[in-house]
Image: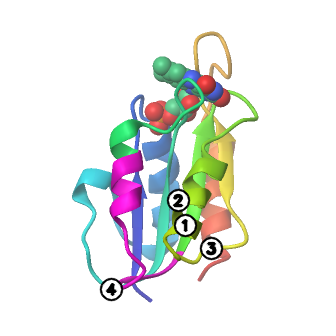
Amino acid sequence: MKVQVIYQTLSGHSRKVAEALALPFNVLAKPFSQYVNQETDLLFIGGGIYAGKLNKKFEIFLNSLSNKNIKKVVIFTTSASDKSAFEQIKAIFLKNNIEVADSSFTCRGRFLFMNWHNPNKEDLTKATEFAKTFI
Ligand SMILES: Cc1cc2nc3c(=O)[nH]c(=O)nc-3n(C[C@H](O)[C@H](O)[C@H](O)COP(=O)(O)O)c2cc1C
């Protein structure tokens, strides 16, 4: 199974989660600028949310993806609150006819005085366990 793990990050939280998701597949988690447009069975993809929105460059990147090479995406997000970027990311994939996995992964990310220690070791262990469900 060909797997890619791609993230958008400003402060590193989503990179940590991406690395934890990549572990069971023995692949390197990469920033979205390093996405390789090749046949991919499973694309783990995600990032943070900023003032309620996706990072603009990431949004443009997401819109550039096509279902020709991607069989299914698994969305992951990090956010300071309950509102993550999940719905915004999912809407782009559905619009572009890319299959989205039923399950997704989310965890808290530090912001100002909130979630001082997240993502923590437990969050990252949960991310790895979540990824294993796709093996
Ligand atoms: C400028 C800025 C704006 C943010 N706005 C929100 C927000 O609207 N809602 C929220 O839940 N988290 C917000 N956050 C928190 C981030 O989504 C959270 O820290 C996330 O883990 C960041 O991911 P990253 O470290 O991969 O960039 C914001 C963070 C920053 C730096």
Q: Residue at x 42, y 28 (%)?
A: 11
User: Does any atom of ligand 1 lie closer than 8 Å to the CB of label 3?
Assistant: no
Q: Please tell me in which quarter of the rendered image ligand 1 is found.
A: top right
Does dot 4 land on a helix, a strand or a loop? loop
Determine the CA span between mark 4 and mark 1: 20 Å
Q: Are marks 2 and 1 in contact (CB under 8 Å)?
A: yes
Write down the residue under mark 4.
39
Does dot 2 land on a helix, a strand or a loop? helix
Residue 64 lies in the magenta-colored region = yes
Write down the residue under mark 1.
95
Q: If the image is split into quadrants, where does the N terminus sit?
A: bottom left
Q: Residue at x 59, y 83 (%)?
A: 135
Write down the residue under mark 2.
92
Camera-side mark, 4 or 1: 1
Colour option used? rainbow
Write down the residue under mark 3.
132
